[in-house]
Amino acid sequence: MPVLKRINEQTRPDWCRVTSAGVFKIPVTGTFDNHYHDCHEYWLIYKGRALVRSEGVEYQVEPGDIVLTQAGEDHDVVEVYEDLEGFWFEDATPDGGRIGHLHRTDADARSHSVIPRSGV
């Protein structure tokens, strides 16, 4: 059984249906992009605090929270209050689906600052 740091098209075994999985880190001074996928995605937050948007709703997240985003729905990290760390898991991409961050507009494709605007 392989042990991987990240699952993607190049590293996953032939029998694996997971599109991708791994660890992400977003510092308070970092950036992120509003995007969607052709597969469902899940984030398990294990460090930090942030404001995220999934399926049009904003949520305050902290360690232990799981963000679930349905295929085709936009999601984003809006503001980071304490350096954020988590694990992402992208379910199987259906036949004909695209892999990676997908963007509806050029503005969505550009990363934006996650520095809190509210001074939190």
Image: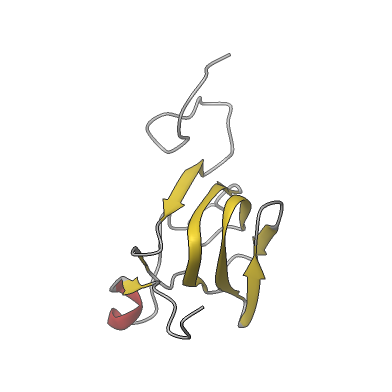
Q: Quadrant of residue 112?
A: bottom left
Given residues 14 and 27, the one toward you in this image is 27
| Residue farthest bottom in this picture | 118
Q: Residue at x 61, y 49 (%)?
A: 91
Given residues 8 and 24, the one toward you in this image is 24
Image check: 103 left or right of 43? left
Q: Is residue 36 visible?
A: no
**Where does the N terminus fall, quadrant-wise?**
top right
Image check: 91 left or right of 31? right
Residue 66 horizontal/vertical position (percent): 69, 56
Q: Is residue 3 visible?
A: yes
- Image: 47 above or below 11: below
How many numbered discs?
0
Q: Residue at x 50, y 25 (%)?
A: 13
What is the image's colouring?
A: secondary structure
Given residues 33 and 50, the one toward you in this image is 50
Residue 32 horizontal/vertical position (percent): 38, 66
Q: Residue at x 55, y 67 (%)?
A: 50
Residue 27 horizontal/vertical position (percent): 40, 57
- Image: 1 above or below 119: above
Q: Residue at x 50, y 67 (%)?
A: 81
| Residue farthest top in this picture | 1
Residue 25 horizontal/vertical position (percent): 44, 50
